[in-house]
Amino acid sequence: MHRRIIVPSALAASLLLAIPASAADYVPGAPGIGDSYYPASGNGGYDVSHYDLRLKYQPATDLLEGTATILARTTQNLSRFNLDLGLKASEVRVDGRLAKFTATGDHELEIVPAVPLPKNKQVTVVVRYAGKPSEFKVDGWSAWHRTPDGGVAAQEPDSAAWWFPSNDHPRDKATFDVSVSVPDGTQAISNGVLQSQSSRLGWTRFNWRSNKPQATYLATLAVGKFDITTDTTANGLPVLNAYSKDLGDNAGAARASIERTAEVAEWLEGVFGPYPFNALGGYVPNVTSGYALETQTRPFYSPRQFANGANVSVVVHELAHQWYGDSVSVRDWKDIWVNEGFARYSQWLWSEKEGEGTAQELADYVYATRTAEDPFWTVRPGDPGPDDQFHIAVYDRGALALQALRNEIGDEDFFAILKGWPQRFAHGNARVADFVRYAEEVSGRPLAALFDTWLYQPAKPAAGPSPATAQ
Ligand code: ARG
Ligand code: ZN
């Protein structure tokens, strides 16, 4: 016999409110955030506010294992969502409940929470994972540098998937606590302030905190044997530099450059305004690759940057990125000029101050030495394409664009813009078009044609970036 349960209509209405109208309202989060160059980078449907990473790394075997606790807020009703991770997850919990998960594609972790997630919910995702970062490759390519005494995660545009699960795109920044346990006698270096370090049972744990929004590719981890120097700036910021014990003949030049970090940052504050973060420093691991990277608060420098003696210019470049790239980040990877054009131009300003050639002289030199046939001019710094994202033209032609701007609007407005922009978009994201609009606003002049010539035309401009001749 069936009994019908009669539900009073007011109660029925409230039940309808509490229960999702239908499962169809809950849809999967996109497997990419919508980047024009890297469609798989980042994910849709949520926004991360904080990463807490508790890790252990064994240099002898390259085994990294641990737990990531991710605080996020949903931006849509979610039936499932993705994280970007190249290592292997063994357990995932969403708000305490075990979740189903599958590794798909290149480095996607697809997570189905036990209960669908409504829009605007604060969620806590816990991922247990492990793996050998050097074994994870994308198209034969790796962001992980294995060294004789450890390993380093530092690359652009991606490096996070080699060491932690994330929403891997500069558009979703978050604060970071990174705690890493390594065998006694070995160090683990990361971003921000070293809150504490302690040893027990043969392992030393290093606790790092980066307390301002940080893009995932700017989070770094370096494990190895380092000599560490510490100091405090005149403004009270902690400085911590780390030099691999294995730098050979480059050790002196590395120190003679990076120990000048506080001096360079102070000079940059005069140009760009207040330093945006809670710590300063740099580190030089014993890697074989040659580049440097503006990892937040603590840039990564290859030893090869110091093969010819001190190289303060690269320190200027990576520290300039703390304002232009790290605090104000690209909205989309095609906006790379808002990072590299300015970091290069800051090197020209440093040269000008040091009496080694003014920015105008350096711009004229680039313009004169790059012939019209040089493929340099076919790269469009305003949208170079993924294959040419770090082409020398993005840097040098990008800086030429700024010299052209300086001559067009004069020093007063130009330097007001250099200082105003990091304030306007502090700890956020911006596009090339945002810069053009901002420069027009400050200078009160139409600048579209100038930027089109210097950033978007695939040809050498007919005239160099020289001061306008007086009428
Ligand atoms: N943003 C870095 C710099 O200019 C570029 C790193 C490019 N990566 C590379 N493998 N070249 O300092
Ligand atoms: Zn750069």
Image (tube, rainbow, N blue to C red):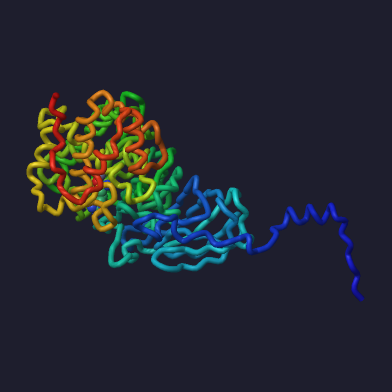
Write the residue at 19% across / 30% down.
407
Is residue 244 visible from the viewing direction of this image? Answer: no
Q: Quadrant of residue 289?
A: bottom left
Report the side of 263 relative to 12 (left or right): left
From what the image shows, is residue 352 above or below residue 378?
above
Seen from the viewer's position, the closer of residues 431 and 149 is 431
Q: Quadrant of residue 264?
A: top left
Write the residue at 19% across / 44% down.
397
Residue 29 picture location, percent across and down: 52, 59
Residue found at the far bottom of this picture = 1
Instruction: Give the mark count.
Output: 0
Report the side of 335 relative to 245 (left or right): right
Report the side of 75 relative to 276 (left or right): right
Residue 240 picture location, percent across and down: 31, 37
Residue 69 picture location, percent across and down: 51, 52
In which quadrant of this rendering is ligand 2 seen?
Answer: top left
Residue 346 picture location, percent across and down: 22, 35
Seen from the viewer's position, the closer of residues 270 and 132 is 270
Write the residue at 42% across / 44% down.
207
Residue found at the far front of this picture = 471
Is residue 84 visible from the viewing direction of this image? Answer: yes
Seen from the viewer's position, the closer of residues 446 and 229 is 446
Quadrant, the N terminus = bottom right
From what the image shows, is residue 376 above or below residue 137?
above
Quadrant, the C terminus = top left
